[in-house]
Image: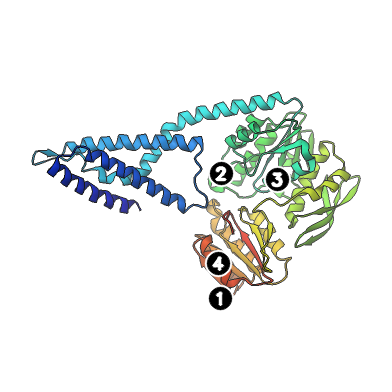
Amino acid sequence: MLVCLSLAFLLLTAACYAITVFYGAEYVKWILLGLFSLLSALFILCTWKKSPTLLKFTPRAVRLLCALTVVHFLISRLLIFLGGLIQVSGEGLDFSLLFILPVLVLPAAAVALISVKPVESAVARHFISKAKKKLDERQGLIRIGITGSYGKTSVKNMIAALLGESAYATPASFNTPMGICRAVNDMPEGVRYFVCEMGARRPGDIAELCGIVRPRVGVITGIAPQHIQTFGTIDNIVATKGELIENLPCNGIAVFNGYDEKAAEMYISCPIRRRYLTKRSVHYENIRLTPRGSVFDLVTREERAECRLLLIGRHNIENFCLAAQVCLALGMTLEDVAERCENIRPVPHRLEIIDTGRGITVIDDGYNSNVRGAKAALEALSLFDGRKIVAAQGFTETGSKDEELNTRLGEQIAEVADIAILIGVKAKLIEQGLALHYFPRENIYIVSSLSEAQKLFGKILRAGDALLIENDLPENV
């Protein structure tokens, strides 16, 4: 696209040179700049069109686009000045270099981003200060922080559902500083519990979020090699997630997922007096998994209660144990927890069951991109009757473990699925895992995008099939 833009500008500059030579029209240079702006806009629009979602013109986006416009204009003026130094028959070719402007779109964007960084930092400090002030003004507000490599959104929503109307949770996957600040500033009156999801991609991210929220309750959902490309090692992931526990007050509450090995290790070294490890303090028994949910006994050291969860997958029961432990530690009874568990609804795109009305069941797990969640999704798929089809793109940001994890995913798919639709650049790695289990080659389809996979769905799927959409594919199915 950049090459095509450059060729178009080369033609435009040649035409404008001819017009200037024959008619002496100085304004042609400015027309050319206008045409460049139009072509640049078309380039950006074409780029957006290939994304799952269109760019929203937030204040930050508007500031960046304004800076980009200014940078482009300054670069254009510089090229005109340099072109004026080139002489042919005594005439300056001041606009002759403008055809290279499209090549400078990406460097110009980098310069624009750097130029607005001080402004963005000031805006961020303002919103953080405003959010802290609003939280401090809420007397008696109990702040609950949730972090981990997986399950954050699910556990957050479970806790909020169990606590009822007195709880307010950060919406969707708002787990960054600005996302959390926006959630805080939108918080309604009368809230007693603020349930906050905390995400991280690098060491120090959770500590930064704790500086804003200052949680009293901390929940560790589990550790997996998610974002290991930016973290570097599993130990860095553990240390970063542990920043939540380090920032709890002495009278705080720490809850760890006992069904996760790394989280259980974090429990052992936790200095907080009120600390809980699910599987030990709260666990499940007599589990009955179905394609529409699960029934199980929730058991504490003193009592038990039957729970009906309208979510599929064993991992959701483990997540529920975390949510239940938080609520029990805050004073709820086990009876209330069991009664309210049916209020919990699936998180969109996370093992969400979609009935197509044509006898085909779609399990939308398109927001899941971690190893543990994918394994749980395949286990859930195995509960369905009929043919089982998996559409997956594999794991990203897995660093040196890229081949190992994606090949293992292929092996897990082979154990459950009848048909595999592999999407994108990780397809060959997943195919290696399928081959290790002698998965029929004629039942493997490799496509470059979800839109191509959707075309296959119409040809392959039939009544009675169950289709699992897996691995970070948040487009509409």
Q: Which residue is mark 2?
A: 231
Label 3 amino acid? Thr
Q: Are marks 1 and 3 in contact (CB under 8 Å)?
A: no
Disc 4: which residue: 431
Front position in the image: 218 or 306: 306
Figure quadrant of residue 454: bottom right
Which of the two marks, 1 or 2, is nearer to us in this view? Answer: 1
CA distance for labels 3 and 4: 30 Å
3 or 4: tag closer to the N-terminus: 3
Residue type for callout 1:
Glu
First in sequence: mark 3 vs mark 2: 3
Picture coordinates of residue 378 (x, y %)?
67, 62
N-terminal of the two: label 4 or label 1? 4
Q: Quadrant of the C terminus?
A: bottom right
Q: Which residue is mark 3?
A: 221
- Considering depth in this image, is 461 or 358 the residue closer to the camera? 358
Residue at mark 1: 442
Task: Tell me if 417 is positioned left or right of 83 in this view.
Answer: right
Residue 282: percent from left, percent from top: 83, 46
The kind of residue on which mark 2 rests is: Phe
